Image (tube, helix red, strand yellow):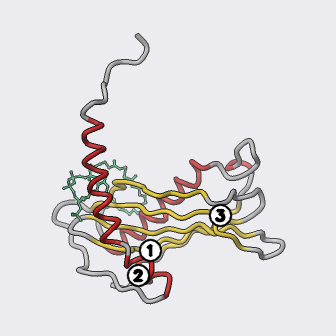
Amino acid sequence: MKCSQTRAIQTHIITYPYLNFHKTLFGGQLMAWLDETAGISAVRVSRAAIVTASVDHLDFLAPLKASHSACIEAYVSGVGTRSIEIFAKIIGEDLLTGDRYLAGTCFMTFVVPKGASLPEKIEPETKEEHFICQGYEARKQVRQAKRQESLALASNVDLDIPWN
Ligand SMILES: CCCCCCCCCCCCCCCC(=O)SCCNC(=O)CCNC(=O)[C@H](O)C(C)(C)COP(=O)(O)OP(=O)(O)OC[C@H]1O[C@@H](n2cnc3c(N)ncnc32)[C@H](O)[C@@H]1OP(=O)(O)O
């Protein structure tokens, strides 16, 4: 399957309900939009009830200002046995001037239920897709090592009620 067949796009206007006290987009709102857009891309490659497993390298590169638009574009950049890596980019646009800027990039991993099937490989076509997809195996190895660290950390986190 080609990257382009998995592409999902959302465009939002940055307006009052989404602003923080800097009058720029609240980062948590951007994360919710990213999860939705990337999730749709993950469903496009799997046609299955995916879950978000992890988000890594969400880099907030530039603030998204009030009255600008934010275009989130996501596509599959690699697949494993049950995991799907999505690359997403967030492009801000000053709608009055047409100036565009990269506001952020992100990799997310979604997991399909046991029994669901994924294509054997993802085919990049554009220069950007080739660049992003070629790093998949290295990123997956890092992620697997981080997951072991995370599981070790979780086994040391206490569940005591915090108000005593
Ligand atoms: C009815 C619905 C219809 C659908 C309609 C369409 C909807 C379209 C729009 C959706 C847009 C919104 C999307 C929001 C989706 C949520 O909001 S989901 C809610 C938030 N997420 C969760 O609650 C997930 C909670 N965690 C879990 O359930 C489990 O820990 C997981 C993530 C499924 C892993 O389970 P597991 O069975 O222990 O995994 P395991 O067998 O060890 O590994 C399986 C694969 O996952 C990878 N993996 C596991 N954990 C991680 C990790 N933390 N990081 C990276 N990779 C990992 C492994 O490396 C392995 O990869 P492969 O070698 O198979 O490629």
Question: Which is more N-terminal, label 3 or label 2?
Answer: 2
**Residue 13 location (% of width, % of height):** 70, 62
Question: Disc 2 marks which residue?
Answer: 3
Question: Which is more N-terminal, label 1 or label 2?
Answer: 2
Mark 2 neighbour density, 10 Å: few (under 14) some (14–19) many (20 or more): many
- The image shows residue 71, relative to residue 16, as above or below, that is below
Q: How far is mark 2 from mark 3, CA to CA?
A: 23 Å
**Residue 148 location (% of width, % of height):** 25, 48
Question: Disc 3 marks which residue?
Answer: 12
- The image shows residue 50, relative to residue 21, as above or below, that is below
- The image shows residue 31, relative to residue 151, as above or below, that is below
Amino acid at dot 1: Tyr
Question: Disc 1 marks which residue?
Answer: 75
Q: How far is mark 2 from mark 1, CA to CA?
A: 6 Å
At x 72%, y 70%, the residue is 93
- The image shows residue 49, relative to residue 154, as above or below, that is below
Amino acid at dot 2: Cys
